[in-house]
Amino acid sequence: MTKELDLNEIDARITFHLASEIMEVSFNDLVFSNSAQVNAFYDRVEDRIAETGEKLWFFLVDYRNTRIDSAAWVAFARRGKALNLAHSMGSVRFDASEVTRRQIEQTQGTAEFNPNLFYDRDSALARLARLPSKRKKKLQHTPNYDAETLRARLSFMPEAQIMDVDFTGLSLEHSGDVDLLYDVIEEEVAATGQKWFFLINYEDTRIQAPAWVRYAARGKVLNLNWSLGSVRYAPGSETEADIRLRAESQAFRPNIRNTRDEALARIAEMKADTNAQTG
């Protein structure tokens, strides 16, 4: 984007066609120069989907005159993949450029043909109309863990005001895993009646793409309600990359450290800063 878009400008580019179960997103004439711009746009798309109360939509994406600079490509690809896996029943895009027209003409009827890329909006809509809706199935993701197993990963250090969260070896596959995890955490924290510094061990943790959108949404609410500050340590490269992407546009410091001792030291700094401000 040549300039930062505010929420109203992004909202104007997101349209829900309720009868056809389509969410239409327009990237028309946008230039994404960096990952922060990408994250701000996708954050709003996720929020708008949540506001509808419907998890699943067909995606219709307008790519006319869109440019995604190299500094924004990784974020654009990761956020788009996560959004599709979490909420899409099928995605099509259209781009009325000569490059797209030639690509379609040259590959049509071959193994390289992309059935989800169209030259015009009407053709893209016709493709979506042929796809089956998954809403009636009301897919429920059965958690891969039980509540007590997850509860055993939490402990409290009252004198230090720290809730110690051990995600070692945890793989969150989908929204069912995420919701159970956060239900347990919220229940335990609420029972204490106070806020805590969150110390989170991400060693060998995997938050799979279908789980990321829900994980980010639940984590945001948990932090707003119960956190004095969060520090994470030992994340793997994939998890760390996603945390840093979300932090860019959601106004929080990722506070990622390599070791537990470094994370505890960071919490001590945060406490000292808080005490200095209140003192």
Image: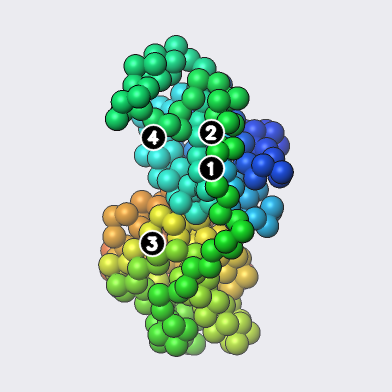
Marks 1 & 3, CB-CB < 8 Å contact: no
Please name the residue shown 65% across and 55% down the image.
54
Q: Earlier in the sequence, mark 1 or mark 4?
A: 4
Q: Nearer the viewer, mark 1 or mark 4?
A: 1
Q: Is residue 276 above or below residue 250?
A: below
Q: Which mark is residue 131?
A: 1
Q: Which residue position holds label 2?
A: 127
The secondary element bearing badge 1 is classed as loop
User: Crowdedness of circle 3 by 10 Å Cα count: few (<14), some, many (20+)?
Assistant: some
* Separation of marks 1 and 3 at Cα, in angstroms: 29 Å
How packed mark 4 is, by other alpha carbons closer than 10 Å (few <14, some 14-19, many 20 or more), is: some
Q: CA distance from mark 4 to mark 2?
A: 27 Å
Locate residue 24, reporting x and y percent. 62, 36
Q: CA distance from mark 4 to mark 3?
A: 21 Å
- Dividing the picture into quarters, in which one does residue 172 lie? bottom left
Q: Quadrant of residue 154?
A: bottom left
Q: Is disc 4 in contact with disc 3, using a CB cutoff of under 8 Å?
A: no
According to the image, label 4 marks what residue?
73
* Nearer the camera: disc 1 or disc 3: 1
Q: Which residue is mark 3?
A: 207
Q: Nearer the viewer, residue 92 or 146?
A: 92
Q: Residue at x 52, y 17 (%)?
A: 96
- What's the residue type where badge 2 is placed? Arg
In this view, the mark in front (3 or 2) = 2
Cβ atoms under marks 1 and 2 closer than 8 Å = yes
| Amino acid, disc 4 | Trp
Q: Secondary structure at mark 3?
A: strand
Residue 272 locus on image (x, y percent): 49, 70
